[in-house]
Amino acid sequence: MIMGRAKLLCLGGCREVGRSAYLLNIENKSFLLDYGVLLNDVPLFPLHISPNSIDAVLLTHPHLDHSGLLPLLFSSRISPPAYTTKLNVEILEYLILDMMKLSGNFLPYEVEELYKAINGSSPLHYKEELELEGITVKALNAGHVPGSCMFLLESKEEKIKILYTGDFNTIETRLVNPVDMNEMLSECPIDLVVMESTYGDRQHEDRRLTEKNFVESVANHVEDGGLVLIPAFAYGRAQEILHVLYKYLNGLEIYVDGMAKQVSLELLNFKEFLRDGEFYEKALKRAKFVRGPKDRKKILKTGGVVISPSGMLKGGPSTLYARYLAERGNGAIFLVSYQIPNTPGDYLLKYGKLDPGSEKVKCDVRWFDFSSHAGKNELLDFITKIVDFSGGRTKVVLVHGEERAIVTLEEELRSRGIEAMGPKNGDLLII
Ligand SMILES: [Zn+2]
Ligand SMILES: [Zn+2]
């Protein structure tokens, strides 16, 4: 690596998925890229950083593995300015309040700091150029969830341009537009890419095929009078599934429960972040919101489709439906997101039980790949194009992936002659 135009201090999110936090130093100015937590029974945090030493915080999106510790930066008198899209700030409030309910005792901040963080965040638009401390900062659509962004930072003085991808997707989903590759390539040459690697060792099935198998399976159960539970994260996945169901099965009774209701309504105020806001509005109007235990009882009797958090059956109304289906068996549980090891969702897929002490579930259980992350081929394609358009000078730092994903991607990139590295937490990279 060339000496000293920029430094990257890896605070978390290296060789793991969770607690993403990277301190990028250019021209002696420090930018904190995301500040997340790793959610476990006891949440894990990135390495300590003093808010005074940060000139600005850039938040890619409000998933807690990127945002969960942000309020901590607002607990001292002087806090750094934060920048992200307006929608990200809105969703941040829902997700952090929800985490505080579950893990509040373990978090080093209170609700007051959350609202300081919200008020201390300045909204930015995609493609808008900001001058922060002499560095040009630009946010681009990341295609991961509505409002998610990547950040480009450029120093004219040091003649260096850096891309931090955050979580991203280059294939089109129902809910959001993918990364605009032409726009990305028009930003080249890019000297350094700090890239997520979640699916560095795995390919996704073709998305349209997943959708087809999914809706057919849902329809089969509902036609038989069964109930199909789709445990889904309240922000992003719940709405993606709603889109898919409405597109193919709009005659069906689709229920939405838990926090997915509020988040779904909130997104109506931010249709500019959706691929087809009008279609989304129609789908949402057709869906029925579950208002409480009475409604739930009725649904258990009549059947239909319920989209409900949590996506890994760790809490929220999805657990109620799951217990019912496990006992009665009249229907299915269709998991539609990555299941973190040792969550009830993961246990269900591996052993067909909701927990070690229970019986095998009587309902149908399946998993469908509705990932909002780029798969292995997309990651390789993305980075290879950038390297080509940058005349081969781009270096790659791989983060946000389990060990195996990072190593696989690292080897693959090196075999293509691309300089890639997968640092560890605590590493300081001189670029
Ligand atoms: Zn994410
Ligand atoms: Zn993430």
Image (cartoon, rainbow, N blue to C red):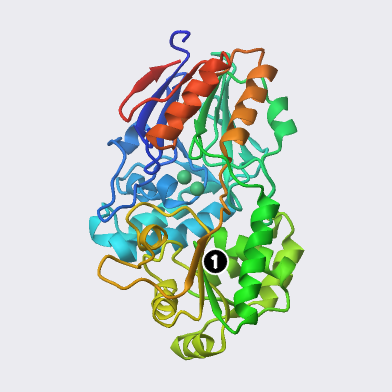
**Percent coordinates x, y for residue 329 in the rendering:** 46, 79
Tell me: residue 267, above or below residue 416.
below
Number of residues whose C-alpha sits closer than 10 Å to that of mark 1, classed few (under 14), some (14–19) or many (20 or more)? some
**Percent coordinates x, y for residue 123 in the rendering:** 57, 48
Q: Is mark 1 on a helix, strand or loop?
A: helix
Which residue is more in the foreground, 283 or 216? Answer: 216
| Quadrant position of residue 306 | bottom right
Q: In this view, does 98 lie to the left or right of 226?
A: left
**Percent coordinates x, y for residue 407 in the rendering:** 43, 27
Which residue is more in the foreground, 173 or 431? Answer: 173
Tell me: residue 425, above or below residue 363.
above
How many numbered discs, if any?
Answer: 1
Tell me: residue 420, above or below residue 265.
above
Residue extending furthest toward the top = 2
Q: Is residue 190 left or right of residue 200?
A: right
For the question of whether residue 280 can be seen, the reply is yes
**What residue do we see at 38% from left, 77% from top?**
323
Instruction: Indicate the amino acid at tag 1.
Output: Val
Q: Does the residue labelled 1 lie within 8 Å of ligand 1?
A: no
Tell me: residue 278, above or below residue 27.
below
| Quadrant position of residue 403 | top left
**What residue do we see at 50% from left, 81% from top?**
330
**What residue do we see at 28% from left, 36% from top?**
47
For the question of whether residue 273 can be seen, the reply is no
List the residue tagged with mark 1: 263
